[in-house]
Image (spheres, grey):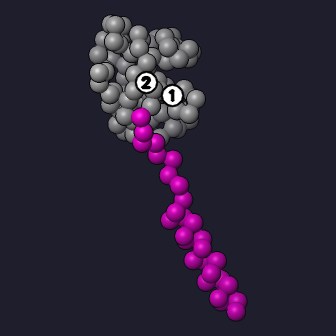
Amino acid sequence: MKYLFLLTVSVLSSCAVIIAPSNEINRIAKASCGKCNFEMTSDECELAIELNGTYYFVEGSSIDEHGDAHNAAGLCSKIRDAKVLGKVKHGVFVAEKFELIDIK
């Protein structure tokens, strides 16, 4: 009986590790300049996203990679949708992929 209990605990423990939720984010998010549009504290214009009401600066992609930030459709002028893939680490969104969705 003791061995059956230990076996059950062992199996359940290993299952918990296998089905543990991932903190990877793969979704459409609002993207813009954190300083200009999301009222985040920064000395310069920086790419940021909004996830569930919280704003994060983006690491792994920069505002300048997505065109002129200060033109009429730029990220300092508009809040855009973006396909994002990555994780939040230490209060920053670390992007594996970051793609702005075309304006129609």
74 horizontally vs 14: left or right: left
The residue that appears at 43% across and 24% down in the rendered structure is 31
- Residue bearing mark 1: 50
Question: How many numbered tags mark residues here?
Answer: 2
Which amino acid type corresponds to the residue marked 1 in the rendered image?
Answer: Glu
Q: Gap between marks 2 and 1, in whole Å?
A: 7 Å
- Residue bearing mark 2: 31
The residue that appears at 65% across and 83% down in the rendered structure is 6
Quarter of the view holding residue 84: top left
Q: Is residue 24 magenta?
A: yes
Q: Is residue 77 magenta?
A: no
The residue that appears at 55% across and 71% down in the rendered structure is 14
Residue situated in front as seen by the camera: 55 or 2: 55
Residue situated in front as seen by the camera: 57 or 99: 99
Which amino acid type corresponds to the residue marked 2 in the rendered image?
Answer: Ala
N-terminal-most mark, 2 or 1: 2
The residue that appears at 39% across and 26% down in the rendered structure is 81
Span colored in magenta = 1-28
